[in-house]
């Protein structure tokens, strides 16, 4: 989207903040009032009639198309200037005049009667918005910008129109006709959902695209006659990234929308979880500070096997990437030992995302020719790290899970030869709206973290490249060593 439109959206959304409850109204045979007789009113009348509404139009005069409808009895025309009595027996009202005072009077009268009112192109006077529509009846998609950016809604509608096949409507009608039989044949929700996936992606949809509805219906009924095969459950290890839902891969998004059960970590962001299927079971399996992590991991192993053996699709959702300090290897070993089918969807690990969102290149031909990912938590708290190797120059160190050991980490690096003036960057809540980046030198690492109250999740970057952070900073809050 072009920057100018985005800036306008931000400004207008700030002026008129609102969150709408999405709803599809059944207006068939119900009275709806449109105030106004011009071309805008005519467009609203047409949309309402397509929904089956009984339309009353109030205006001193009508444009030609509306006048013809009034003469033919297609609409009920009330001639004159707006009066509250026009709202008698009305379920919904649309104010479509070019007179702001009239529109405001309509809104006030509707509000007094608790009737929902839309004032065309005036969001602050509207108690409901008319969305942009993608019509694949009976499938209907509605796009709303809450009235603050109608151009954006229209652009999205245009894109969706090109993406969604026109056979989706007939496919939905076919599924609706056979819904009772499908429910009876597949009482289990998970199996029924997978049947619908087959319906959307398989030969039934193909026959409809070829304009052969009889063959499509025969394919559907034939599958029901043969019986939908029982499927074994499976587990997908999905890397959720550091928090920004925009960093999810397409495969990760698909897995979240196909899951029956989601086992998610404590640091999985709410924005990422919001992209999952609404009716999936969500189970928090995050490890808390101070608890027995091995016992929690054993519970995770048991839950994965239990749900998979029950025929469910399980997503094991991990922050960052499952194979970088995420114990993903241990989980796959357990699944393999118990004969559970699995796959892995990589995620953007914290070091890559946090560095990028802090404006810090992990490698740079002038400063660092290599990068090391290091965990500050070793098995059984044994310090087996190669401190001599870590202290060498011309490399970048990315420490995971090290917030509680910053003083120890800086002391060990300096003791083994890393210069005390080596730059560092500590990225808290990397890629999330609340991201903060504290920079300084290795000697004052712990003190600066305490001064700014840095808490997990936070990633520590040590090396000359960290000095580029304040210069290349572009996201979140930057807390530099000087001039804060």
Image: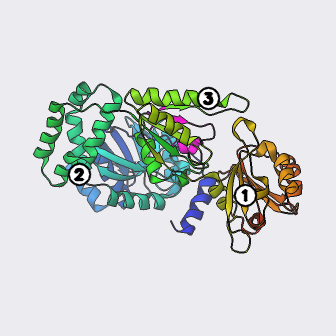
Alpha carbon distance from label 3 to label 2? 48 Å
User: Badge 1 is on which residue?
Assistant: 397
Q: Earlier in the sequence, mark 1 or mark 3?
A: 3
| Residue 428 coordinates in the image, percent (x, y) | 73, 50
Q: Nearer the viewer, mark 3 or mark 2?
A: 3
Q: Nearer the viewer, residue 57 or 245?
A: 245
The verdict on residue 267 being magenta is yes
The part of the chain drawn in magenta is 261-281
Point 31% across, 55% down: residue: 164
Q: Disc 2, disc 1: CB below 8 Å?
A: no
The verdict on residue 332 being magenta is no
User: Badge 2 is on which residue?
Assistant: 167
Q: Nearer the viewer, residue 338 or 272?
A: 338
Place residue 227 in its image quadrant: top left
| Residue 429 coordinates in the image, percent (x, y) | 69, 49
Q: Nearer the viewer, residue 312 or 64?
A: 312
Q: Secondary structure at mark 2?
A: loop
Q: Quadrant of the C terminus?
A: bottom right
Q: Nearer the viewer, residue 79 or 53?
A: 53
Q: Secondary structure at mark 1?
A: strand
The answer to whether residue 127 shows anywhere in this view is no
Q: Residues within 10 Å of mark 2 (few under 14, many from 20)?
A: some
Q: Earlier in the sequence, mark 3 or mark 2?
A: 2
Alpha carbon distance from label 2 to label 1? 54 Å
Q: Disc 3, disc 2: CB below 8 Å?
A: no
Alpha carbon distance from label 1 to label 3? 29 Å
User: Badge 3 is on which residue?
Assistant: 296
Point 16% across, 50% down: residue: 207
Q: Earlier in the sequence, mark 2 or mark 1?
A: 2
Does residue 293 sit above or below 358 in this rendering? above
Q: Residues within 10 Å of mark 3 (few under 14, many from 20)?
A: some
């Amino acid at each position: 989207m072009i920057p100018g439109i985005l800036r306008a959206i931000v400004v207008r959304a700030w002026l008129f903040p609102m969150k709408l409850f999405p709803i599809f109204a059944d207006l068939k045979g119900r009275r709806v009032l449109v105030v106004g007789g011009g071309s805008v009113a005519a467009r609203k009348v047409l949309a309402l009639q397509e929904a089956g509404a009984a339309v009353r139009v109030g205006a001193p005069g009508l444009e030609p198309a509306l006048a013809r409808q009034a003469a033919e009895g297609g609409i009920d025309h009330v001639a004159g200037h707006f009066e509250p009595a026009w709202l008698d027996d009305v379920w919904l009202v649309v104010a479509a005049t070019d007179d702001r005072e009239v529109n405001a009077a309509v809104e006030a009268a509707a509000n007094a009667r608790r009737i929902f009112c839309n004032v065309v192109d005036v969001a602050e006077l509207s108690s409901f918005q008319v969305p942009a529509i993608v019509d694949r009846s009976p499938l209907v998609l509605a796009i709303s910008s809450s009235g603050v950016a109608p151009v954006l809604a229209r652009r999205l509608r245009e894109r969706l129109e090109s993406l969604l096949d026109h056979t989706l409507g007939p496919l939905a009608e076919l599924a609706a006709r056979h819904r009772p039989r499908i429910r009876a044949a597949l009482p289990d929700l998970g199996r029924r959902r997978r049947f619908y996936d087959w319906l959307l992606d398989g030969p039934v949809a193909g026959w409809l695209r070829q304009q052969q509805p009889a063959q499509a219906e025969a394919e559907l009924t034939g599958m029901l006659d043969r019986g939908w095969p029982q499927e074994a459950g499976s587990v997908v290890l999905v890397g959720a990234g550091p928090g920004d839902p925009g960093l999810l891969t397409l495969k990760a998004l698909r897995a979240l929308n196909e899951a029956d059960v989601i086992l998610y970590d404590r640091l999985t962001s709410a924005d990422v979880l919001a992209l999952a299927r609404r009716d999936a079971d969500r189970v928090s399996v995050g490890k808390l500070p101070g608890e027995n992590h091995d016992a929690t991991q054993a519970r995770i192993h048991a839950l994965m096997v239990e749900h998979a053996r029950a025929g469910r699709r399980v997503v094991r959702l991990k922050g960052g990437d499952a194979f970088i300090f995420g114990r993903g290897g241990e989980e796959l070993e357990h699944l393999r030992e118990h004969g559970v089918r699995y796959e892995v969807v990589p995620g953007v690990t914290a070091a890559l995302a946090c560095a990028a969102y802090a404006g810090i290149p992990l490698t740079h031909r002038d400063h660092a020719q290599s990068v090391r990912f290091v965990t500050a938590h070793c098995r059984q708290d044994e310090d087996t790290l190669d401190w001599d190797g870590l202290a060498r120059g011309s490399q970048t160190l990315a420490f995971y899970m090290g917030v509680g050991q910053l003083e120890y980490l800086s002391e060990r690096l300096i003791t083994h030869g890393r210069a005390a003036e080596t730059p560092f960057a500590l990225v808290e809540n990397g890629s999330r709206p609340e991201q903060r980046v504290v920079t300084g030198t290795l000697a004052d690492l712990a003190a600066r973290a305490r001064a700014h109250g840095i808490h997990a999740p936070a990633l520590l970057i040590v090396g000359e490249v960290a000095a580029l952070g304040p210069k290349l900073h572009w996201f979140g809050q930057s807390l530099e060593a000087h001039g804060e």
